[in-house]
Image (cartoon, rainbow, N blue to C red):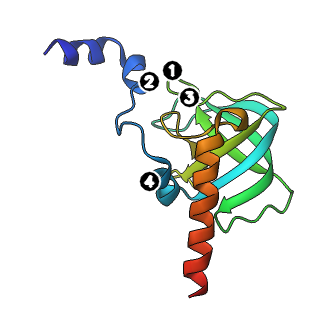
């Protein structure tokens, strides 16, 4: 009962919790719409829709797409992160491994509880992503 009271009194804390725990790289890869490495070239805040806090919109220049039939007509892709305690913080000029899923509004969202991270902190995850990508392409050929 005390937990429920804390969640009701401090809803921002509830947003920071990882409701579905921390997925393995393999699970997050399978659930993601887009998996890529890229560099953040622009960051700005956008107004949230119903059910969302304000969103940080980050524009990326992809260096490699491991999963996703995503067209980049401008050479960039926009990814969103909720501007709450549960957001995935990103910095312009830094390179990241990104796992993105599509929200009900068609936006690509990065999960703070997932395996997205700076490339410099993603050696194991990146190796696993490369392996999963090769296996997926091999299966598609068959």
**Residue identifier under label 2:** 16
Between 30 and 121, the residue placed more toward the observer is: 121
Q: CA distance from mark 2 to mark 4?
A: 21 Å
**Residue identifier under label 3:** 87
Which corner quadrant of the image does residue 89 belong to?
A: top right
Q: Position of residue 100 (x, y in %)?
A: 59, 49
Q: Position of residue 78 (x, y in %)?
A: 72, 47
Residue at 60%, 55% in the rendered image: 129
* CB atoms of marks 1 and 2 within 8 Å: yes
Residue 43, above or below 73: above
Identify the secondary structure beneath mark 1.
Answer: loop
Mark 1 or mark 4: name the one nearer the start of the chain.
Answer: 4
Residue at 39%, 17% in the rendered image: 13
Mark 2 vs mark 4: give the one in front.
4
Q: CA distance from mark 3 to mark 2?
A: 8 Å
Mark 2: few, some, or many residues within 10 Å (few <14, many ≥20)?
Answer: some
Mark 1: few, some, or many residues within 10 Å (few <14, many ≥20)?
Answer: some
- Please state if 83 lies on the left or on the right of 57 as rendered: left
Indicate the quadrant containing the C terminus: top left, top right, bottom left or bottom right.
bottom right
Mark 1 vs mark 4: give the one in front.
4
**Residue identifier under label 1:** 85
Q: Position of residue 70 (x, y in %)?
A: 70, 64
Q: CA distance from mark 1 to mark 4?
A: 24 Å
Residue 120, above or below 6: below
Can the viewer see residue 78? yes
Q: CA distance from mark 3 to mark 1?
A: 6 Å
Q: Which mark is residue 23?
A: none
Q: CA distance from mark 4 to mark 3?
A: 20 Å
Mark 4 or mark 3: name the one nearer the start of the chain.
Answer: 4
Residue at 45%, 36% in the rendered image: 51
**Residue identifier under label 4:** 27
């Amino acid at each position: 009962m005390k937990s429920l009271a804390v969640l009701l009194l401090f809803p921002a804390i509830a947003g920071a919790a990882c409701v579905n725990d921390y997925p393995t790289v393999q699970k997050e890869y399978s659930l993601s719409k887009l998996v890529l490495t890229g560099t953040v070239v622009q960051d700005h805040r956008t107004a949230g829709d119903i059910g969302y806090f304000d969103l940080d919109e980050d524009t990326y220049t992809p260096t490699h797409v491991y999963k996703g039939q995503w067209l980049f007509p401008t050479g960039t892709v926009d990814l969103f992160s909720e501007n709450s305690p549960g957001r995935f913080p990103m910095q312009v000029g830094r390179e990241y491994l990104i796992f993105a899923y599509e929200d009900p509004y068609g936006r690509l969202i990065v999960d703070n509880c997932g395996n997205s991270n700076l490339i410099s902190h993603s050696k194991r995850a990146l190796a696993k992503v490369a392996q999963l990508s090769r296996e997926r392409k091999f299966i598609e050929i068959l």
